[in-house]
Image (tube, rainbow, N blue to C red):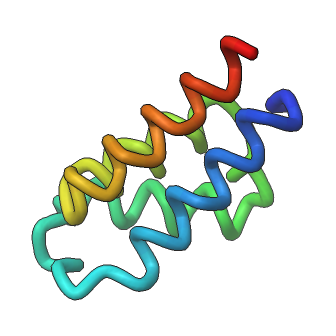
Amino acid sequence: MLSRGKRALLEELLEIVLASVNPSLVRDEVGWELAHLIRERKLHTERGYRTVLKAAMSCEPEKTKKILRRYRRVGRR
């Protein structure tokens, strides 16, 4: 199970993926893995986090980096 902060980050990254205008940039294997994790109710695991991050970096790298920087700054406080 993920920490509360990492879970919130995962949710924001997932929103980026689902709202992206570039879904075709996400490799099929990553999409299938994401669907499998959701179906198995294992999205909020370390594996789920890595898969969502990979998908977000594929379709919206700049938005993803911006969110990661924001979370990094918040974590330092």
Q: Residue furthest front?
A: 77
The quarter of the rendered structure image containing the N terminus is top right
Eyeballing the image, is 2 above or below 57? above
Which percent across, then down, holds residue 67? 46, 47
- Indicate left or right for 49 with 43 as reference: left
- Indicate left or right for 5 with 75 as reference: right
Eyeballing the image, is 41 above or below 22? above
- Indicate left or right for 41 with 16 as reference: right
Residue placed most toward the observer, 69 or 31: 69
Residue drawn at point x = 69 percent, y = 69 percent? 39
Residue drawn at point x = 22 percent, y = 53 percent? 62
Which percent across, then down, holds residue 4? 87, 36
Residue drawn at point x = 59 percent, y = 43 percent? 48
Q: Residue furthest left?
A: 25
Eyeballing the image, is 67 above or below 69? below
Which percent across, then down, holds residue 21? 22, 87
Task: Please count the marks in the image.
Answer: 0
